[in-house]
Amino acid sequence: MSVTTPREDLRRHARVSPERIACVDGDLRVTFAVLADAVDAWAAELTASGVRPGDRVVMLLDNSARFLGMYLATLSLGAVAVPLNPVGGTAGVTDPIRDAAPRLIVCETRMAAAVAGSFGAGGPARELAGPALGGSVSLVAPKPAEYEGLDGTGTPLAAIIYTSGSTGPPKGVMLSIANMGAIARAGCDFVDLTPDDRLGVVTPMFHLYALREVDAALRSGATLVLPKALAFPASVIQQLHRERVTGISGVPSGFLLITEGFELQLGSLAEHLRYVALGTAVAAPALLATLRSALPATRVLVTYGLTELSRACYREVTDPDERPGSVGGPYPGVELEIRGHADIAVGPAIPGRVILRSEMVMQGYWRRPDLTARTLLPDGALLTPDIGSVDEQGWLSLLGRADDVINSGGEKIGPDEVEQVLREHPAVEDAAVTGAPDPAGVLGEVVKAWIVRAPGAELDAEQVRRHCAARLEPAKVPRLVEFCGTLPKTALGKTSRALLGREG
Amino acid sequence: MTERQLATIEGELKEYILGVARDHGHPLEDLDREDDFIEAQVFDSLSLLDFIMHVEQVVGVKIPPEDVVPENFGSLAATSAYLRDTFGLT
């Protein structure tokens, strides 16, 4: 099957069904024709701002038609979209922006002054002219970075998505145009998307988990429904109900908040909702059972993937559920292997590292050839950080991770990055970071900081959190802080997170 | 509930929200009664729930989940109006 680019898909829909709705953004309804015109106009603006094929364009945009238009304008130029978190100020995105070395930063106008101040080359931010698509977007020309020699793999890239690893700063996952096309195709096929579908996007679009919905919707001609005020579950459900959404992909913690307080409202979606998909973290059997009973005619699907290979496995949750712990079998075209000790493939029921092969596997980590070489095997297979086993039918169960990355409500958080920020505080002599169960029972794990105060120094938990909040994205700020006399060390003098206990 | 309670409560909630914004690393210089919490990016879904629980504690009421919508809790003014209309605070 051919791979079309999102821009080609958009042009086709604008030609064949110009008045169909491409995107619902709060009260704004954007047709394919209007979207295509906006994308052309914005692509011209980007070109005028110096954006050339292969250049990175950082996007600090809310879930919105603006995001959609700017993403497509960037791709249409052969430039590389680098979507980052627009919430929580500029501190949390400093490392990725420096690493990406963008030609241009596109941001919500509300944050334009701060972005220009932190990253700009000196000139003010410029508000984008042309079609507004429901809000104001500003352009910031960043300080010239080392542009040259950063063309990556030689394969045309569509996006670089930043994700946390267990060590070092966030790493940029390079996804080619072909990768994104294959991900979109898998996303369409596994739920048979049609132009009559309306997909509710309830997670941030700077994550691949939601961004891939954009490509899938464009490929199939479905409508994207982007609710406003994602923090208000009742309001989100109202908007999804009003727009008669037929599919929702979300994270278990989000569905948990909804089923705990809004089960009746959730039931109001049942008439039109064909499927719900849960991914990015393991969904508890009780949550799946609640969804099954609240939405008896809706397909409930569990998905497994990584930013490095977005659609690895999935399964349909049946009633009664036969294999509650499983994330299912591979998507078509994905090859799943479990490797035990000595790198030898093992058979059913034996745990080992999860290895995946697919045309969806990333091109590597941006500017991190060593890390890429450790993650992509010589035959192109992806060595995931996940430990799992397969059953006789080839279905995968996840048993844990081979690294220390914390999964907090689907957000992956590398402890090194948080520890480094903690150690920058003058009252901190030593610090370690682990995952601990969320006391509220929603996020699965939360970030826990273990702190040894400097002699004579005073420091309380709130000061620790404020220090982190000023330097990290909100999800990375420790929700739990414990002060201790020493931190357990390994024989080599390295702090042992395992001895601190992930049970916290 | 005493006569002066709603104004006092609103002042207290304002301090609470400024604290949340500070903890989230994007301190607000001030917050007007009409400022839109969503526009100001004050809450994510968890800190919103914390806020609602805080309101319940301060006011001594139980807020039905279906009432937690931007029309009722999208700004300080909206929150006060909701507390006035629903729980008779003055």
Image (tube, coloured by chain):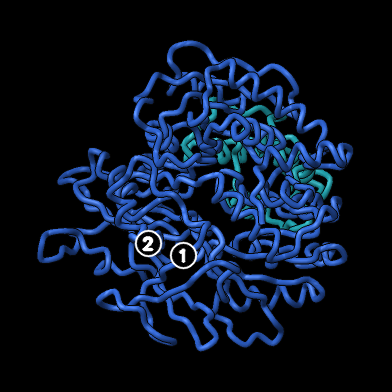
In the rendered image, residue A62, in percent from the top left (x then y), is placed at 63, 37
In the rendered image, residue A339, in percent from the top left (x then y), is placed at 35, 75
In the rendered image, residue A90, in percent from the top left (x then y), is placed at 46, 31
Helix, strand or loop under label 1: strand
Identify whether A30 is placed above or below A279.
Answer: above
Residue A132 marker? none
Q: Amino acid at mark 1?
A: Arg
Helix, strand or loop under label 2: loop
- Counting residues from the start of the chain, the first of labels 1 and 2 encountered is 1
From the viewer's perspective, tell me whether residue A273 is left or right of residue A259: right
From the viewer's perspective, tell me whether residue A163 is left or right of residue A210: left
Identify whether A3 is placed above or below A97.
Answer: below
Residue for point 18% across, 46% down: A454
Q: Choose top left, top right, bottom left or bottom right for residue A11.
A: top right
Q: Residues within 10 Å of mark 2 (few under 14, many from 20)?
A: few
Which residue occupies the extreme top position in the image?
A: A123
In the rendered image, residue A99, in percent from the top left (x then y), is placed at 38, 35
Q: Which residue is mark 2?
A: A379
Q: Colour of chain A?
A: blue
The quarter of the picture where the N terminus of chain A appears is bottom right
Which chain is displayed in cyan in the rendered image?
A: B
Q: Are tags 1 and 2 found on a single chain?
A: yes
